[in-house]
Image (cartoon, helix red, strand yellow):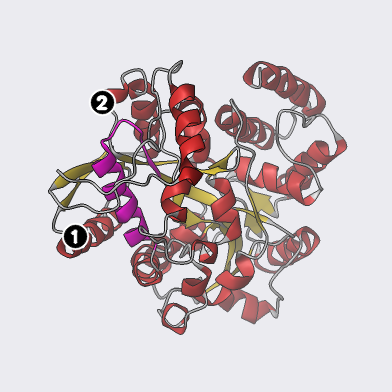
Amino acid sequence: MKLKKITALALAALTTATVMAGCSSKGGDTSNAEIVTEITEPVEITFWHAMNGDLEKSLQSLSDEFTKQNPNIKVTLQNQSSYQDLQQKITATVASPKDLPTITQAYPDWMFNPIKENLVTDLTPYIENETLKFDNYEDILPSFREAAKIDGKIYGMPFNKSTEVLWYNKTLFNELNLQVPTTYEELVNVSKTIKEKKGIVGAGFDALNTYYTTFVKAEGESFDSKFDVTSDASVKAINYYLDGVKEGYFRIAGTDKYLSGPFANETIGMYVGSNAGENFIKQGVGDKFEIGVAPYPTSTALQQGTDLYVFSNGTPEQKTAAYEFLKFLTTKENQIKWAEETGYIPVRKSAIESEEYKNSGRLIAPILSKATENLYTNPILSGADAAYREAGTVMESILSDTKIDVTKRLEEFKTTLSSIWE
């Protein structure tokens, strides 16, 4: 096969450095040694994902359309059942890089070690290449772009992204003449009113680990290896939620797993949860009441969801084919289609602001410009995933037992984190 290769001097030093860096690693990322700029013969790429139900149908539809437009590229989707199973499979397979797929869905912190071991392709030279042309990379939301970078290199392509929003019973709010909360203080006040007037819980947060890191972020701190979980900001985060649970105007999901169930059953007036839960909320609520949605009630919100990564074990043709697929998935047109069908956030600003999307019938569409203004990303560090999950465990243990010694529990948390961050 005759290949078109990038041989520009601008990439020569990068190529040499990459190859030399790979010599001492088990992966040996030589992804920049040659970049194919045209696929002229059939090539197959595999894609590990964790999309199920309607999400998988939408992904398959996009994949089929890509194949029609690119007949030389066959995309084989391989469902790994769940995010947990996908993470475990990636972790297990990096020991045998030849068995890795071409592309995978992954959270950035899952890829920290594979990237350090040169097992993941740096997409920067592809995005910057004039022949391969990425349509306005700057149009992708800045927080999504930054989350997929490590050491200044672009390793991931944003895909199924979400953030948390405030879901509320609009019918109830109208009945009680309530204003939608925009701050933590207002959330407490409105929740107390709902509890007093209707005898039900006012509010809650679906993901306790996200609640915790968002609260401390709003206090000007970042949940990383330097953060002291016994600090004033941490204690304030705990007590804010704990006070509400004790007085009955807040609750946690607990055995319900998600607050969309209690919300649909009208036993809670509002809750903070993922925008991607819109389909489930609509199905649960039906015609019982009108659903309202608003941005997260504080100064910032966590950007969530996975990115797409290309492993470096593929051939130059496979990596270019994978890159072309990533480009296709992130066009304005396809991001609108994906968002309309799944409820995820379009990764492009132009898609979010388009009239087509705003008028799509998605409840979140009109508020996304505001809801995505100030998204933050948890630091991508070794141990970050485990530390984030531990934060949720600690929060649940405290909020499930209001008689617990908070100071002692936070000291235990600090000890646990000292080993996680090592």
- Front residue of this view, candidates 362 and 398: 362
Quarter of image, res 408: top right
Q: Which residue occupies the foreground of this view, 111 or 15? A: 15
The furthest residue to the front = 9
Q: Residue at x 44, y 18 (%)?
A: 25
Magenta stretch prevailing secondary structure? helix
The quadrant the C terminus occupies is top right
SS class, disc 1: loop
Q: Where's residue 202, x and y in %?
A: 66, 60
Residue 47 seen anywhere in this rendered image of the structure: no
Instruction: Identify which residue is drawn at 37% across, 70% down.
Output: 340
User: Where in the figure is residue 341, as x and y percent of width and height?
Assistant: 33, 67
Q: Amino acid at mark 1?
A: Asn
Left or right relative to 92: residue 251:
right
Within the image, what quadrant is residue 134 found in? Answer: bottom left
- Residue 268 vs residue 138, the one in the foreground: 138
Label 2, secondary structure: give it.
helix
* Residue 190 in view here: yes
Identify the residue under disc 1: 70
Residue 279: x %, y % from top left? 39, 64
Name the residue beneath numbered marker 2. Answer: 99
Furthest toward the right, the residue is: 232
Q: Which residues are magenta?
A: 309-330
| Cα separation between marks 2 and 1 | 25 Å
For badge 2, the amino acid type reads: Asp
**Relative to 208, residue 354 above or below:** below
Quarter of the picture holding the N terminus: top left
Q: With 408 as the anchor, is 293 left or right in this view?
A: left
Neighbor class of circle 2 (other Cα within 10 Å; few <14, some 14-19, many 20+) is: few
